Amino acid sequence: MATNMKPPPAAADFLKHHGWNDAQILPVAGDASFRRYFRVQSGDRRAILMDAPPPHEDPKPFIAIAEYLKNSGFSAPDIFARDLTHGLVLLEDFGDKRMREHLDYRPEDEDAIYRQTIDLLRKLHRAPAAALRAYDGQQYLLEANLLTDWYCPAQQLDVDTESFDATWRQILEPVIKAQNPPVTVMRDYHAENIMLLEDGRLGLLDFQDALIGHPAYDLVSMLQDARRDVSDELEENMLSYYLTDHDKDAAEEFRGHYAILGAQRNTKIIGIFTRLSVRDGKERYLDFLPRMWRLLEKDLCHPALAPMKQWFDRNIPVEVRSQPIPVSEATR
């Protein structure tokens, strides 16, 4: 299903009202949601127009979290103008130097840039948490259920959903206890949402779904990236770097929680990417599934996940994981 990149009908009046009446409106890359983005150019001025159309999208959380991040000393886009009725927001343009593509061309910068992303998380986790709802057990389970709701039916698998839920509740209990006090969790903190700014800082994007929860979650999001291969060596080096100020026992406990949240996140993403293909016709997301299974299987090897590994071994055959059935065929 192709994304319509024609500007929304209300865009021209919105821009004119805010002093951009002679601007060009050019499409830029979107994401996996209903949101679309356009670059607005007027002379030497540039901005980004976010189209977050109701009722599918609500730009208010993005605006609120952008303001929280900026007030906490981080580089989130300035908000130039907003029209909440039509879901239009005019944002600061962070340019085109995205972490993902920069590292594709300059792999020698990988260690330094990943260290910078870890430094940002360490700073964020020392800051007072945003006024957001908690990443609680119900939310974790709802997300994990995307696998049994979408992936398993698409692969024609009849699985034990009752024990799936019970096992997740058991495994997540120590994680939930440990996220007190909580930290701000951006939830999509990875190389495609990080801009490398001219002043050397990291520009943050796509944080509208933020919650408050465990500090390991965004670390997993960055180091077990769904869209970019991160070597086991780099992952270990950056995890160790984050844990520099933890004693041995605290670091060991954190690593267990990291593996649990990695498994939860990767389980969720397998379900989401399947849904994007089955429901929305975005079959390109199936290309990420081999990476997601590799990451999930690595997490399941941690002793803290032994009961969950048993569930996967009983319910989803290894051959289905290693050679996924094409969803387009499984759902005919």
Image (cartoon, rainbow, N blue to C red):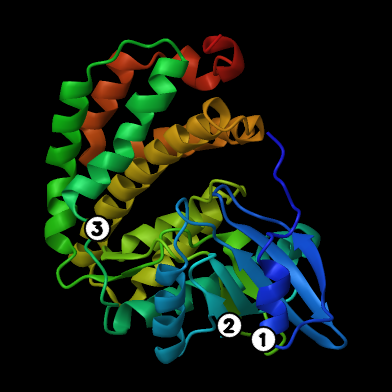
Label 1 to label 2, Cα distance in Å?
7 Å
Residue type for callout 2: Ala
Residue type for callout 1: His
Quadrant where the N terminus sits is top right
Toward the viewer: 316 or 86? Answer: 86
Tag 1–tag 2 contact (CB < 8 Å): yes
Q: Residues within 10 Å of mark 3 (few under 14, many from 20)?
A: some
Q: Earlier in the sequence, mark 1 or mark 2?
A: 1
Element assignment for label 2: strand
Q: Is residue 139 visible to us here?
A: yes
Q: Which residue is mark 2?
A: 81
Residue 172, numbered circle: none
Q: Earlier in the sequence, mark 3 or mark 1?
A: 1
Q: Is residue 77 visible to us here?
A: no
Which residue is at 54% across, 78% downward? 82
Residue type for callout 3: Tyr
Toward the viewer: 11 or 59? Answer: 11
Tag 3–tag 1 contact (CB < 8 Å): no
| For residue 289, above or below residue 122 | above
Answer with the quarter of the image where residue 73 lies: bottom left
Which residue is at 40% across, 69% downward? 61
Quadrant where the C terminus sits is top right
Which residue is at 16% across, 62% downward? 178
Q: Which residue is mark 1?
A: 18
Element assignment for label 3: loop
Label 3 to label 2, Cα distance in Å?
30 Å
Toward the viewer: 186 or 242? Answer: 186
Element assignment for label 1: loop
Q: Residues within 10 Å of mark 1 (few under 14, many from 20)?
A: few
Q: Which residue is mark 3?
A: 135
Label 3 to label 1, Cα distance in Å?
37 Å
